[in-house]
Image (cartoon, helix red, strand yellow):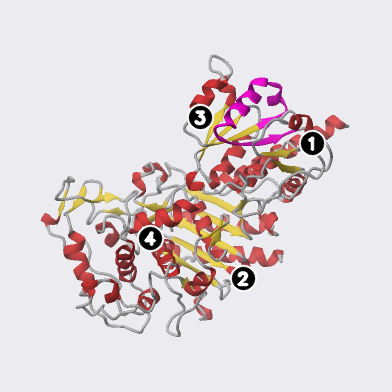
Amino acid sequence: MAKKFMRKNNRLFHTLTLFVFIVFNSACAQNPPFTGRAYVEEEKLVQQSTVLFNNSAYVIPLQNPDQLKIASIHFSNQYAIGFDSLLNKYSKAQSFNGNDYSGVKTLDDLSFDLKLYNTLIIQLTDADLDNPQVLSFINSNQKIKRVIIALFGSSNALIKLNDVSAPIIWCERVSPVAAFFSAQAIFGGIAITQKLDRNLSRNYRKKMGFTTDKIRLQYTVPEDAGINATDLLGIDNIATEAILNQATPGCVVLVAKDGKVIFNKAYGHHSYDRTVPENITDIFDLASMTKISATTMETMLLYDQGRLNLDSTVGAYLPMAQKTSKNDIKVREILEHQAGLVPDIPTFEPLKPTDHSTDSSAAYPTKVNNGYYLRKDFFKDVMWPEMLNSPLKTRGKYVYSDLSMCFMQQIIETLTSTPENVYIQQQLYTPLGLQTTGFLPLYRFPVSRIPPTEDDEVYRHALLDGYVHDPTAALMGGVAGHAGLFSDANDLAILYQMMLNRGAYGGVQYIKPETVDLFTAKQSDVSRRGLGFDRWDPIPEHHYPSQLASPQAYGHTGFTGTCVWVDAKYNLVYIFLSNRVNPLVSSKLSSLNIRPRIQDVIYQAIQKGM
């Protein structure tokens, strides 16, 4: 009977592993092999059997992800791949197999290879602690490094760690769910709530243990947020419809509900030749999502610091604007798109042959694309004067304008004395632990991770891959207030969970709650918009951003086929990323209502589960 029970449980855990792998790492739409309720039940059992020791220094949850250099070491943990994949949702963690150091190499060699890492997360099982060299490895490294132990197994294994002073997360259950749970608990994606229920040794006595709070996103199944996974299958159908109708060659969809990422799938390929499958870690050109994900958030930071006044004027911050029609425009008007600015300025059309070169040099330093370099000070000499002298025709009315955030970029850079891409990276993205979000992605990532956008046969004469699609942003060197930001879906989930948390994430208050409330609220009777942020449209027939979105919804879309929407009523973050402009610009993504229809499937699933 016992053997039959164990075989049944092993099959269950294998199925759980497959299911969670699909949910967390799927490269295409797949139907889960069974309901996630079994996962939720196992997670409850894991939580009840997980205890944290030696955390008086509050090492767990880990803080300051930007300062972490993490190595994850395993020996016989059969679920190490899943454990490490969850670690990497929060911060880059390099995996090491300790068994590779059991022959010619020794654990001393492993210690040498770990010298550039300041945080060692060591996964242990009962079998590992039968090896005295492993204990010696732990004891020597905990004196010079931050060491965290994730132990899976019996109380006898825990007792062998009596002399270890490093934090220990002990889970008596051995399962893939236990591995996922412990990895997330290290970063505060899941709270540790239990204390020891019995005496084990002199160091591990009844009622001992530290509890922690949930401070970051959790990665789990829809059922963990009260949603039936089968009710989200409509997302698969709509995404497939988009690809079959060539509305986009591929896309990534992410859903976070109640601080839990419950859906994250990739569909299709980077292009219609189907050579590179889409992946959830792909880095997309966000286009106008840059406006809220970078420039508006920088504005909020400066507003919190008292360095920027919404009722101050452009001329007060930019002396060059004082003798132009932009002098008395208020910052508030710019953010509301009510300043009367034209939508954009001419881009590639006015360029002269002497304005660009095929080679970089001191005279042509601005890289627009491979083999395309712009002359020095082209923005200052040509584009900026064009923006400053552009007509004001509709002041006081809502007219969406890319120039709005170009002006905000100049104000921000003047106030901070720092390029926009550097400032937002230092002040927000890096402290949050974002791993992909930023401008100029090719300086940090291989082109294979970036789905291409348009094949520009007219101006740049190249497929745009890793270079910003927006022509104005391209001529600005890829860093602009209205476009130029790239990111994967997971980073955006963190960024907008911070917004949903009213400016807080990971135990840090990045933006004041009242500032988040102000910028995301409706600002005037002229339009639906907030300050920088787009919002729910009160006109029923517009169904914007979707038929079922609440009046509390705010976010933005991007020309390349992207969007993010936050809905506080449903505690929801919805992210859709695509490269619908590849190889040529098409309107099918909009005409088929792909993004809003997927959003409605999510709302329907939530309402059905309520």
Which residues make up the magenta segment? 124-153
Between the C-alphas of marks 3 and 2, the distance is: 46 Å
The residue carrying pointer 3 sits among few (fewer than 14), some (14 to 19) or many (20 or more) residues within 10 Å by Cα, namely many
Q: Is residue 310 above or below residue 378?
A: below
- Position of 112 compared to 409: left or right? right
User: Identity of the amino acid at label 3?
Assistant: Leu
Q: Quadrant of residue 309?
A: bottom left
**Pointer 1 or 3: first along the chain:** 1
Q: Which residue is mark 1?
A: 8
Q: Nearer the viewer, residue 411 or 390?
A: 411
Disc 1 and disc 3 in contact, CB within 8 angstroms: no
Q: Which mark is residue 287?
A: 4
Name the secondary structure under disc 1.
helix
Residue 169, percent across and down? 69, 40
User: Identity of the amino acid at label 4?
Assistant: Ala
Q: Which residue is mark 2?
A: 569
Name the secondary structure under disc 2.
helix
**Does 130 appear in magenta?**
yes
Q: Is residue 397 above or below residue 38?
A: below
Between the C-alphas of marks 1 and 3, the distance is: 39 Å
Q: Which residue is mark 3?
A: 114
What residue is rendered at 28% in x and 60% in y? 471
The residue carrying pointer 2 sits among few (fewer than 14), some (14 to 19) or many (20 or more) residues within 10 Å by Cα, namely few
Name the secondary structure under disc 4.
helix
